[in-house]
Image: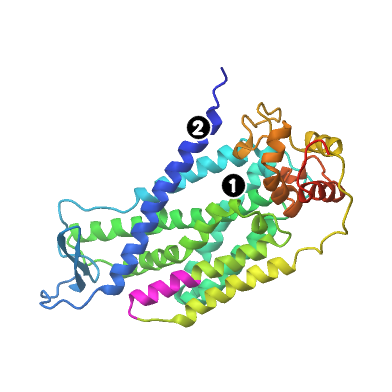
Amino acid sequence: MTFDWAAWANLALRWLHLTAGIAWIGSSFYFMWLDSHLKAPANPPPKTATGGVAGELWSVHSGGFYHQMKFMVAPQGMPDELHWFKWEAYTTWISGVLLLALIFYVGADVNLIDASRLALTNWQAIGIGVGSLALGWLAYDTLCRSPLGANLRAFGVIWFLVLTAAAYGLTRVFSDLGAVMHVGAIIGTVMVANVFLVIIPNQRKVVAQVLAGETPDPALGKQAKQRSVHNNYMTLPVLFVMISNHYPMIVSAPLNWLWLAGLGIVGWTIRHFFNLKNAGQLRFDVLALGALAFITVAVLNETAKPPPAAPVAVPPFTEVRALIDRHCVTCHAAQPTHKGILAPPNGVVLDTDEGLTKNAAKVYERAVKTHSMPLNNETKMTDAERASLGAWISAGAKVGS
């Protein structure tokens, strides 16, 4: 019996990544909401060297009442127990990087390298992938520490352009899905590096200063807050990247980098609308901007598609069978023969006539409509072959005809 360890490892890492991501993003959303709902305390305590209480909030949940207070810099003394919100972020990133490595680095020749774009060895592709994560962080951190970092709007525009440039460049080097996932990995790496290298260290310094009886440096909290706000705005774009493999009309489109940028704007506007709403501002113009961006991407994506090819004659089934056997069944078979493929992707089996007719609609979507299969067009499937296959499926995908 052959144990499909790769499939089970993929499932375990993907589930862990999703669970940890929910916890991390949930805490980010909650604390942004909490900050926007704090009110001046009804009975403010005397001011101390730390500046006193910045705001408080009473809330009710699950049958209990809660009283939260935020200090301007830090409390005068530290409690015995202090919860640090960090492991949610670390676990999300670690599981995500392991998943990236399992799918795109262990399987670089299948899932990451597109020889029609750039002929790379596995190690060259892996080096470029890892290097893009490091360069992404260095570019972001440099921008944050520059005068531009003090202006959230200007910083947001420049960082958006940097990510768009990264998407454009990576889609010229890697396979479509490999490039898109590395854009998401850049964003995720920046977010967790913010936590690991700035937010948590700054908080530790403040705690140490309070315990030493010193006046805490308010600049440390301000810098940590800056990075936390940035993380909050990057959550929805990175979430879309996580699920983007389900949308080949975006990932596999010739202008995928542009559509990814447009949907990033949609995610940013949605997050900004809710942040403003939590602060008591109903800015439907912001929501309208997001809706306009989404509609624009959808319309331009559809109009950018090449015109339909001239009708072709429905080929005999024997020709279709040979075409499928040549381009698809090394992966999509009960027992795949392609290197690194241990089970038919998504359970789609095409090595039998029954399996082919059952999955004809999926074959049309991936091989004919979006050209996302064969993966990286490894078998060099021609446009004429795609048109012929499409004609057979459109005519009813009849076996033996």
Query: In the image, which residues are magenta?
Result: 269-280
Residue named by callout 1: 130
Q: Position of residue 312 (x, y in %)?
A: 88, 53
Specify whether residue 241 is painted magenta: no
What count of labels does the image hold? Answer: 2
On the rendered image, what quadrant is the C terminus found in? top right
**Residue at label 2?**
8
Kindly state the secondary structure of the residue where label 2 is placed.
helix
| Three-letter amino acid code of the residue under disc 2 | Trp
Q: Is residue 42 left or right of residue 353?
A: left
Most foreground residue, 17 or 40: 17
Q: Quadrant of the N terminus?
A: top right
The answer to if 276 sits in the magenta stretch is yes
Amino acid on which the number 1 mark rests in the picture: Val
Query: Which label belongs to residue 298?
Result: none
Viewer-nearest of discs 2 and 1: 2
* Residue at screen point 46% across, 75% down: 152
Q: Quadrant of residue 110?
A: top right
Q: Is residue 213 left or right of residue 370?
A: left
Q: Is residue 222 above or below residue 167?
A: below
The vertical placement of 71 against 3, above or below, is: below
Evaluate whether residue 51 shows in this view: no
The residue at 18%/57% (across/down) is 211
Farthest residue in the top direction?
Answer: 1
Asked if residue 106 is positioned above or below residue 381 in the image, the reply reads above
Residue name at image x 16 percent, y 59 percent: 63
Q: Residues within 10 Å of mark 2 (few under 14, many from 20)?
A: few
- Residue 253 shows in this picture: yes
Q: Position of residue 118 (x, y in %)?
A: 77, 48
Left or right: where does residue 62 sit relative to residue 294? Answer: left
Q: Position of residue 230 (x, y in %)?
A: 44, 66
